[in-house]
Image: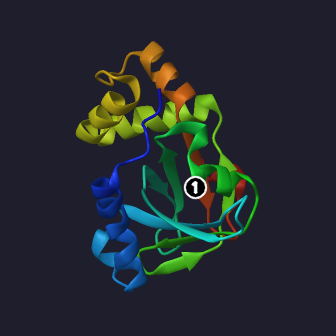
Amino acid sequence: MPTEKPGPVASFLYRAPVALYRARLGWILGGHFLVLTTTGRKSGRTRRTALEVARRAGEPGKLPTLWVVASRGRHTDWYANAVAGGPTRVTWKTHTFTPQVHALDPTERADLLADYQRRHPRAAAMLGSAVLGGEFTADPDQLQRLAAELRALRLDPPGTDVATAR
């Protein structure tokens, strides 16, 4: 099951990267986080969420394609707002751009999670514990189960050839 909404203390800590980006200090986070700005699909209000960059790829000197994971599944507000098609903006390091938003299918999510686990085993273990209630291993069945529970986006910068962004 996807994780529950964070409590007030955790929410405050999760908002710290947003405050850094608002102060134009997001570069301090070294590209490990981005701020996703969406428009609420129901409220119409601007929403900013700091997210860990699960993967990034691209040519040197150009904005990379960024991948992010919704650990609370399909009901994560920022995810639902982004896939609803409203205006979406990414602020990453010192760059702000309007991405092409691509919701990953289960196979793409499984590939992303396997890659994330290889590169960040401790963080993947915490994600698995929070979502699966146990250790996240390289077991294909467990990976498929986790990929079915979570949602993820690929955020392509403007001008990216979507066919080569994988």
Q: Secondary structure at mark 1?
A: helix
Q: Residue at x 51, y 33 (%)?
A: 111
Residue indicated by mark 1: 78
- Depth check: give the residue in front, 62 or 45: 45
Q: Is residue 159 above or below residue 96?
A: above
- Depth check: give the residue in front, 134 or 107: 134
Quarter of the image where one finds residue 142: top left
Q: Residue at x 34, y 23 (%)?
A: 133
Whole-percent x, y for residue 121 in the image: 26, 36
Q: Is residue 23 above or below residue 130?
A: below
- Going by the picture, which residue comes out furthest to the front? 8
Q: Is residue 120 above or below residue 136?
A: below
- Depth check: give the residue in front, 44 or 62: 44
Q: Is residue 58 left or right of residue 83?
A: left
Whole-percent x, y for residue 90 in the image: 55, 69
Q: Residue at x 38, y 16 (%)?
A: 139
Whole-percent x, y for residue 2 in the image: 47, 32
Whole-percent x, y for residue 136 in the image: 33, 25
Q: Residue at x 39, y 24 (%)?
A: 132
Quarter of the image where one finds residue 160: bottom right
Q: Is residue 147 above or below residue 159?
A: above
Q: Mark 1 Cα within 10 Å, few/some/many (few <14, many 20+)?
A: many
- Going by the picture, which residue comes out furthest to the bottom? 23
Residue kind at label 1, given as amino acid type: Trp
